Image: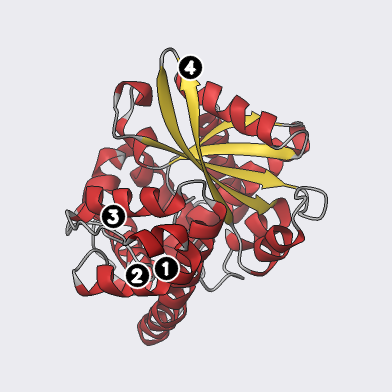
Amino acid sequence: MDEISVTDARQDIDRLIAAEIGLSVAASVRAAADDIRARLGGHARAILFYGSCLRRGGDPAEDDDSVLDFYVLVEGYADLYDNRLLALANLLLPPNVFYAEVPWQGRSLRVKYAIVSEASFRRGCTSRSLHSLLWGRFAQPVRLVYAQDEPARRNVTDALGDAVVTLLAAALPLVPADGSALEPWTRALEESYRTELRTERAGRAGDIVAADGARYAALTPLAMTLARPVSPARARALWALRRAIGKPMSVARLAKGVFTFTGGQSYILWKLHRHSGVTLAPTPWQQRHPLLSAPVLAWRLYRRGAFR
């Protein structure tokens, strides 16, 4: 097999990503994205659809338990919010996450959208970001539902290509050199889940990768050409550091989510029950004071095994 040049590898990754993000989405997904754009005025530079609804395929409006996941890229936060505390929160601990229910053909679509600046998104998809919050998510399949202009589309394509290379490079030192083309991706997602308060069942990462096996297999030789993996010892140390930093950050984001969501406490408890089976009923005081009670609820959920 001929050796792939760095330039050719990057161009091939960009072509694959550009084709993938341009695939069509269900009308309900586009309606949800339009609703987000209306909420944000003219501030949305790009809207990305990702996550479990995308992986399952079909029309998520037909599944009453589905929550549509979006990332919204904006130029900055100062002009986006009337509330300066929200702008500061978005700057210091991105992203800000919001929840909405969008009327659609006689039913209500559950929509969760995260807001982050283009600059933070670009950096977060590269190896300059220690945490896998962005490059762990966006090395996976994505649809670009909206782009304000061609530079916005190009920025998204470049960032997603960076995420692919960064994720693979972080896992390569941890898998056998003679392993399958899908093994590094599975290991990378497993490690990424462990840096957050995830409720994913055992084997979930392998199922996700296998469902798009041809995609990951095509990306493997290209990303390996561009990857700069470290030694196995350093790779393990970096993942340990990501876990040590990532879990407290997840708790902080969870608390912030209760503050930014409309009905956020109910949504978070519903989602944790959906993934883990753990049910927790907040007291009336906790319902009236979701932000103050968030640490106590998080600790009780952790003790019951709702997340690891």
- Left-right relation of 249 to 235: right
- Residue 120's spot in the image, x, y percent? 67, 59
Q: In the structure shown, which secondary structural element does the residue marked by tag 3 occupy?
A: helix
Question: Which residue is drawn at the image coordinates 46% and 78% (left, top)?
Answer: 230
Tell me whether circle 1 and circle 2 mark residues in contact (CB < 8 Å): yes
Gap between marks 4 and 2, in whole Å? 36 Å
Tell me whether circle 4 and circle 2 mark residues in contact (CB < 8 Å): no
N-terminal label among 2 and 3: 3
Numbered circle sitting on residue 27 = 4
The one nearer the camera, 240 or 250, is: 250
Q: Is residue 86 above or below residue 33?
A: below
- Left-right relation of 190 to 151: left
Q: Nearer the viewer, mark 4 or mark 2?
A: 2
N-terminal label among 4 and 2: 4
Q: Nearer the viewer, mark 3 or mark 1?
A: 1
Three-letter residue code for mark 3 = Leu
Numbered circle sitting on residue 298 = 2
N-terminal label among 3 and 4: 4
